[in-house]
Amino acid sequence: MYRVLALFLLCLPVFAWAGAPGQAAIASAHPLATRAGMAVLEAGGNAFDAAVAVSAALGVVEPYSSGLGGGGFWLLHVADDGRQVLVDARETAPGEAHAEMYLDEQGEPVPGLSLNGPLAAGIPGTPAAFVHVSERYGRLPLAETLAPAIALARDGYPVYERMRLGLNFKAEQLRRWPGSELLLPGGEVPPLGARMRLPGLARLMERLARDGLPGFYGGESAAAMVDAVRAHGGIWSLEDLENYRVIEREPLAAEFPGGLRIVLPPPPSAGGVAMIQALNLLQSYDLETMEPAARAHLVVEALRRAFRDRGYLGDPDFVDMPLERLLHPHYAAGLRTSMRNDRATPSAVFSPLHQDEDGDHTTHFSVVDAAGNRVAVTQTLNGWFGSSFIVPGLDLLLNNEMDDFATKPGEPNLYQLVGAGANDIAPGKRMLSSMTPTFLESPRGVAVLGTPGGSRIISMVLLATLAWIEGADAATMTSLPRYHHQYLPDRVVHEPEAFSAEESAALAARGHALQPSRRMYGNMNVVTWDYAGNRLEAATDPRGEIEGWTY
């Protein structure tokens, strides 16, 4: 019997690939999603087919985190030729969007307007990612890779406690819009074990599988979406949907002492830039030999500086960014001169560039197949249940990613971060994100990782990366105590068990303001491949356990 959340190792025949691990591994946030990926691998699919299956299934069984109404980043490694690519399936602003769309007559943000209802929704990218990844990288037809998710949506699955928590949290908003009966039968949160069925979503995925992009972005599907969105105050058009395309981007890659190579998403993800900046800042220190408070102090100082610079970032198709300068070790060396071992640097010392952030309710999964193909996907709707708006008849929950833009420069968004001009709203533009699907490569082996968590994604991935460099396994990486700093507000948010009393006192003595988190956070999913033992390990975050789910 396996532990919850589908910690799973699947043994498959060795494919014709030199040095192949001879196994496949999947780590995702729900056992039904992992099972969907396993079924596709067993049917002869590769890691890319399995990733489509896992992504689609997560969108059904985790409707509070992701789905066809959202978007994400797909980091791919193709074993045959070693090519690595980032499939950018981030949502885009509708064609009628403009910089002042969430402001009142006095130029002030209207509370909730960028968060709730169809006006908060960007044009989804996840369905286009399914088609693109399947056609360009997969082996199986889309109808086969989507079949497990279609069955889950049609036949249903048991409601579990985490879903109930999310429904209780968003019930009031959900009830404001048509289609809420789907998630709240009779207007009430369903009991544990009740069957959750999404028949409209099953039919929508069937059209996508049969017709490709037109099955979602055209025809009756697109018409139903646009009619519902515009009837309730949104601004989508048929042209917005028809014109959506994923973009293949070259990942960011950086090398560090010891043979470490890290592969990360470029903008419009801010995570890759921040990770490389933080590692550049930290590489001059022997963190492994430091006592914990001294180590945490330096990690916080590196994060403070990396998050300050995120204000430079936005959609590369709309803004010019000084990436070469930001990522250069010489730039980090200059920043490092202001880092003291004995004292925190107040964030007010640095002139603000402002920043914006994506949502806390996201999901991540990692896949490695027997040929050595690997996939790291982080996908989201933004907040809990996105915009709370469900397209009637399609059972499609829309994102609220428009809040990830800078609705007004200098104004905080849902996650207490403020926006800058590089990330302002424009038609067709992709909003900045912290989603950070990651590959770690070294003589030791490979790690495929990522996590949900809004702005805290970056600090979680950084802490896991530092642990992996020092020899940690996948299970240790997912269960590490976590702490976070994001430049503004100037405080260290940490899980209750992250620091001992002595370590907290030592950090406070250096001038850090500490704030215990109200809850454990994140839901990291990691697959590692150890070259020495030719062994795969998959691990899911113990924080994300779903009671009662076993194999």
Image: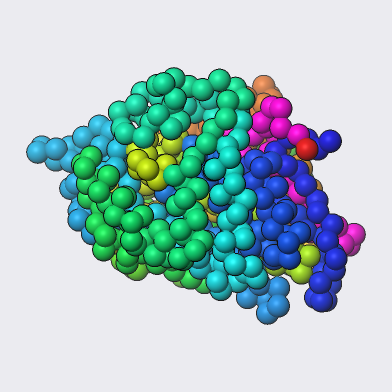
**Horizontal and vertical percent for residue 343?**
54, 38
413 and 299: which is toward the camera: 413
Residue occupying the point 14% across, 38% down: 104
**Horizontal and vertical percent for residue 350?**
39, 47
Residue occupying the point 48% across, 33% down: 491
In this picture, residue 55 sits left or right of residue 216: right
Q: How is the image coloured?
A: rainbow
**Horizontal and vertical percent for residue 49?**
63, 63
Does 526 appear in magenta?
yes
Outermost residue, left side: 105
407 and 112: which is toward the camera: 112
Does 114 appear in magenta?
no
Please say if 245 is above or below 437: below
Please say if 153 is above or below 89: above
Q: Say which quadrant the N terminus sits in.
A: top right
Q: Is residue 122 visible?
A: yes
Q: Quadrant of residue 45?
A: bottom right
Residue occupying the point 25% across, 32% down: 111
In magenta, the rendered stretch is 521-550
Outermost residue, bottom side: 81
